[in-house]
Amino acid sequence: MHVAMEVLRESGVPLTSQIQRFIKGEVTSGVLHPGSRLPSSRSLADDLGVSRSVVVEAYGQLVAEGYLEAVQGAGTRVVRHLRPAPPVPTLLDDGGAPEVRWDLRPNAPAFPHFPRRDWLSSYQRALRTAGAADHDYPPPAGVPALRVELAHYLGRVCGVPSTPDQIMVVAGFAQTLGLLGATLPALGVDALGMENPGHPRLRRFVRECGLRPVPLPVDAEGIDVAALRASGVRAVLVTPAHQYPTGVTLSDRRRAALAAWARESGGWIVEDDYDGGIWYERGSRRPLALRRLAPEHVVYAGTASKTLAPGLRLGWLAAPPALLAPLLRARARHDLGTDSLAQLAFAEFLRGGLYDRHLRRLNALCRDRRYVLEDAVRRHLPGASVPGSAAGLHAYIRLPPRTDEAALVAGALSRSVLVRGAAAFHARAGEGGPALVVGHAQLPRTGIGEAVAVLGELLS
């Protein structure tokens, strides 16, 4: 253990006092964090060239004053009960959720069935075969091996028309939005049309990225393209396969109209395929990518956050050349690329068919949980329904028309069930009917039934 410290013998201040003042100042200023280990008294004395008794005395005084604690067998640490720095708000921040028995939020932290063994074997293969160049800074567009595998996978599974040189690897969808916010204004675009309802914090995030969010209504066919035309915006963000949060799929009629709008106006469409290959709707195949209809106007964006884990920070986009070049320039100004070893591991994961196998398992799990949820809603929530396509990790529960949504959410929390009302997903208060947005994939079957039963008791 080391600590950046020096003492001045010619200062006239006792050495013990110098050590005390330094450590106290570093703790109070937040440089030394709660729980940080300090060197042993012998090691610090050797580093500073002082007697060990000088350090022992300084440590003892700081322990007495409440700055340090001596833990038997673990050495000396900064005390853990000091006030931590306030957290930085993020796109997914829920302001500190209370502990509950059943967490039904769509972004609840427990992620189902990460394929640890397959991911580990892919990472090991990537490490064994990585050359010297693979340990250098990665290209801004991403490691070539991964871009090749993504082009193959996205074309085969999602119908995305692209080539490896049209694909860019990013650190999740949030970075895609940030790069668009840095790029689109230079192309004369200062506003972004956004589905309403939509992600509750996405509008603020887009605004902070430099674009003006413009809410556009969503109905049973998806985004209202007539409202998009009337808005005058030249870029729009959509979730066509599985609208967030209502779950509706953009109809063929609206898809064609949206592509026509882009061609006629020269506008840009950002296709957010946020839950990727998680599709288990009875009797229908997953819709192909919207990018097929207007490849020169659509930026297709995907991520591993829902299918693998958000902590991987792996995402990708397929963009037309006219937009990809400025996106790459913006990327080069902000960072030096995405973790190359993780990219190589994901390339192995795709190449070996392990991602397909994982998605089959994940779809089976999510299908099972969705059916349990639908059955629980039928039994415990009369008058409620679960519209939208069966896909992804969440579902939208439309409540009976006169339901007091806020009272139901508050009552559920008092019964240790944390659930989000649909009101939070709308741009303005009072829009839309009462509904709940429920994450179900992370819960056990019994948990889904128990939580919905609580909601039914409160509703009745």
Image (cartoon, helix red, strand yellow):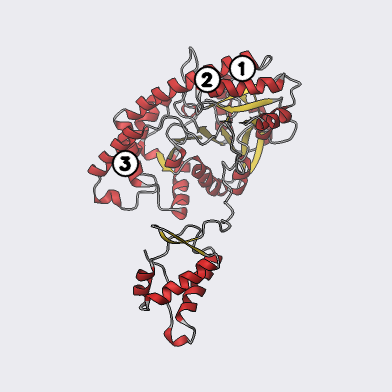
Element type at marker 2? helix
User: How far from the left and from the top, in percent, is residue 2?
Assistant: 38, 66
Q: Looking at the picture, tell me which residue is in the foreground, 146 or 56.
A: 56
Element type at marker 1? helix
Residue that badge 3 annotates: 344
Farthest residue, direction top: 283
Residue depicted at 75% across the width and 26% down the height: 404
Q: Residues within 10 Å of mark 1 (few under 14, many from 20)?
A: many
Q: Looking at the picture, tell me which residue is in the foreground, 236 or 47.
A: 47
Residue that badge 2 annotates: 370
Q: Which mark is residue 377?
A: 1
Mark earlier in primary sequence (2, 1) = 2
Are discs 2 and 1 less than 8 Å apart at CB?
no
- In this rendering, which labeled residue sits more in front, label 1 or label 3? 1
User: How far from the left and from the top, in percent, is residue 75?
Assistant: 40, 61
Q: Quadrant of the N terminus?
A: bottom left
What's under tag 3, amino acid-wise? Leu
- In this rendering, which labeled residue sits more in front, label 2 or label 3? 2
Q: Is residue 263 above or below residue 450?
A: below
Q: Is residue 27 above or below residue 341?
A: below
What's under tag 2, amino acid-wise? Arg
